[in-house]
Amino acid sequence: MRAIGLMSGTSLDGVDVALLDTDGETIAGFGPTGYRAYSDDERALLRAALKEGAQLTDRTQRTPLLARADALVTRAHAEAVELFLERNGLSRADIGVVGFHGQTVLHRPALGLTVQIGDGEALRQRLGIPVVYDLRQADVAAGGQGAPLVPVFHRALAAAAALPRPLAVINIGGVANVTLIGAGETLLAFDTGPGNALIDDWMGERTGERMDEGGAAAARGRADEALLAWLLVHPFFAKPPPKSLDRNAFAFSIVGNVATEDGAATLTAFTARSIARAADFVREPPVLWIVCGGGAKNPELLRLLAHVTGAEIRTGEDVGWSSDFLEAQAFAYLAVRSLKSLPLTYPSTTGVKEPLTGGVILA
């Protein structure tokens, strides 16, 4: 089945679009990809929605600001798909399903809350294509963490590429998560801690830039070792998986009033060291770490990861994957699995009691 996956991550850069040919178990082929950037005004609205979403106690509640953001997310995703189809000479009839993640504004599974804004029904009506959305809620309602959702896709990718085991696949978006694949194809997955979010927020506050391009500022700075030692004793890092993290669990202000480069160095080191702690939860440390997501474009972060893990670090591109569009591809894969009632989450990935499918299907 040809499926389109859509992803708007916690970095708030834009909407990723990817086409995948899959039966929900194996990957028959990768199709083209696309991207619809958010404007500065749209990004500002989404940042405001993140702050307002943090106050929600009811996942169906929409304040006026959140309603505006909800409409924006829906419109942006629809435009992304329409442009993608046009540019690639595809018709709507060519697509079996659209996997629509939406934009996370709140993720607190301990309270039974996960909120992704974006109207699945409105998207289906506009596109005229079946949509699967709200992919985290069933897991959270069943007592799982609702994240990460992509490990089953990582395993399918690793099998197709015949990669060595034990293997770690790291996705570094706003929050970082890991999939650990053992020699017997066992899965263990969880959020490791901050990804790009703190670095991006710090650079935005200090320089107005969206990110630390190429890790240049961090490479010029000096990390605060005492602060890092203190941060890494936070209970989250010692907590056994499964576990997940809200984007707002840590704030860039933890570094204090320091030089821009030193703050960037500290936050980048924080991300690298918290990711490396993932190896604490397996008997055999990974022999290879594959980095995907925005973090794969940060040479300083990759250098630090190699140093703290003592293992080989490769990017998704190094093994023939797309770091930029892997999560969008994953949601295409998950949408097909949802249509076929196949499990999306497992006890070893989210802590749910038994393998569980998920997603709301709008045919």
Image (spheres, helix red, strand yellow):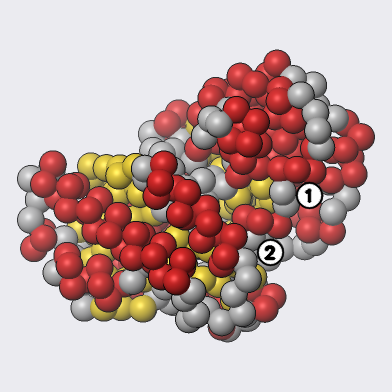
Q: Is residue 310 visible?
A: no
Q: Which residue is found at the position 53% from the left and 57% from the top?
A: 48
The residue pinned by badge 2 equals 243
Q: Is residue 303 positioned above or below 66 on the image?
A: above
- Element at badge 2? loop
Left or right side of 104 for 20: left
**Front residue of this view, candidates 132 and 288:** 132
Which kind of residue does numbered mark 2 sit on?
Answer: Lys
The residue shown at (30%, 42%) is 35
The image position of residue 62, as x and y in percent, is 47, 76
| Residue designated by label 1 | 280
Q: Earlier in the sequence, mark 1 or mark 2?
A: 2
> Which of 167 and 148 lies nearest the eye of the viewer?
148
Is residue 60 visible to the viewer in this orientation of the structure? Answer: yes
Mark carried by residue 267: none
Point out the frontmost of discs 1 and 2.
Answer: 2
